[in-house]
Amino acid sequence: MKSYRKELWFNATRRRQIIHITPQIEECLAESGIKEGLCLVNAMHITASVFINDNESGLHSDYERWLEKLAPEKPYDQYAHNGFEDNADAHLKRTVMGREVVVAVTDGKLDFGPWEAIFYYELDGKRRKRALVKIIGE
Amino acid sequence: MKSYRKELWFNATRRRQIIHITPQIEECLAESGIKEGLCLVNAMHITASVFINDNESGLHSDYERWLEKLAPEKPYDQYAHNGFEDNADAHLKRTVMGREVVVAVTDGKLDFGPWEAIFYYELDGKRRKRALVKIIGE
Amino acid sequence: MKSYRKELWFNATRRRQIIHITPQIEECLAESGIKEGLCLVNAMHITASVFINDNESGLHSDYERWLEKLAPEKPYDQYAHNGFEDNADAHLKRTVMGREVVVAVTDGKLDFGPWEAIFYYELDGKRRKRALVKIIGE
């Protein structure tokens, strides 16, 4: 069994930002030399998400408004977590979006359907944060 | 390490439909000959979900009404994604339900608790779509 | 390839309770002897969740109030599932929180970012229930 590990670093300029990372995951997979296996990609921070959906800007703005409805950022004092911090909403939004994805690796490729793409969703940005890529297989 | 791959195809007659697929995943596992490992099952489409919960029709109708509350289908123009399409709600509903499940394989069986069952949740149906089964192990 | 399996049992005294299980998962990993691979932790019950987030009590009470807003426990008769049972809300809350986590194993450790911690979220407690730990790798 082979295994491969890489950290991807981000520095989102906004509090919330969706970053397309499929090309970087494909590079990792090529570097790994793994042909058959599983590829895990997860946020290493608990106020960020890695998810798979459509690479379409309208949908990304829908996510933004929808998550604000499900778990609004403000008023900050609605959350017990916001004593010294103001990011409770980011913890909840990331819960909806998910921490991680697991993708099949087949013939050395991400085994994706027609429109699947991987995104890092920064929900409490303006600082350096990262995602982990771990691939195991042969 | 062994690996196994299969696509499961569906053609839901309704826009939204929950399809029980545990028996098909068990067949895949038997075919694979894998005794110890991990089994990934994921929707290959971004308007569908694979999830694990109870095989009980009351709960399934609860899901339907609950998801309509969290991310209503109509009016279509409430979503920026719905320029040429009308399925933004399906992208959001699938986000709540999840894209994939990872199940332990032990002694050649899906290592499940008493009521766990796997479902494909079609959220934008009336056409041929598919899920991926990938099993790795020994 | 090595594989390791263990069940973790819980007996939550309240209907809903968040239990920190990172130390137990670290013990499992040490017992397994696996240095590189993937670690799956999943609820074996469909009214409980395993999730990764912050080990901070304010956030945990935010989760409680937030989930009650998204999928209220009462009135019980709002859910079709609640014929003989009263736990439909637990099935929905667990759907938001997720069934499982997959964690990278690197150099014999859970490959975590700075604040990641693993929790079992009991959503229909006052009885013995369990989570599964499955680790594969080398």
Image (cartoon, coloured by chain):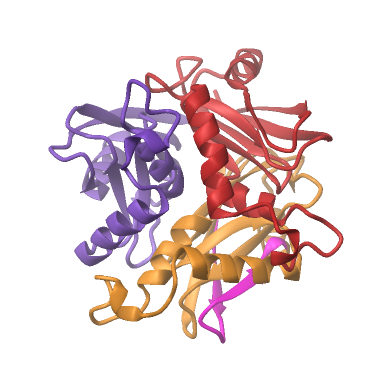
Chain colours: A purple, B orange, C red
Judge whether residue B13 is colored magenta: yes
Quarter of the picture containing the C terminus of chain A is top left
Tell whether C108 sits left or right of C13. left
In the picture, residue C1 is in which quadrant? top right
Residue in view at x 74 percent, y 70 percent: B57
Q: Give coordinates of residue B124: x percent, y percent.
A: 46, 77
Q: Residue C78 versus residue A136: which sits nearer the camera?
A: C78
Q: Is residue C21 above or below residue A17?
A: above
Judge whether residue A13 is colored magenta: no
Asked whether residue C60 is in view, the answer is: yes
Q: Give coordinates of residue B10: x percent, y percent.
A: 56, 77
Q: In this figure, what is the number of numbered marks? A: 0
Q: Residue C7 versus residue A40: which sits nearer the camera?
A: C7
Q: Is residue C59 above or below residue C27?
A: below
| Range of residues picked out in magenta | B5-22
Is most of the magenta stretch helix, strand or loop?
Answer: strand
Q: Residue furthest left?
A: A13
Asked whether residue A42 is in view, the answer is: no
Q: Residue B135 versus residue A131: which sits nearer the camera?
A: A131
Residue in view at x 41 percent, y 21 percent: C115
Q: Residue furthest right?
A: C84
Q: Residue A76 versus residue C95: which sits nearer the camera?
A: A76
In the picture, residue C17 is in which quadrant? top right
Residue in view at x 40 percent, y 70 percent: B89
Q: Give coordinates of residue C74: x percent, y percent.
A: 69, 55
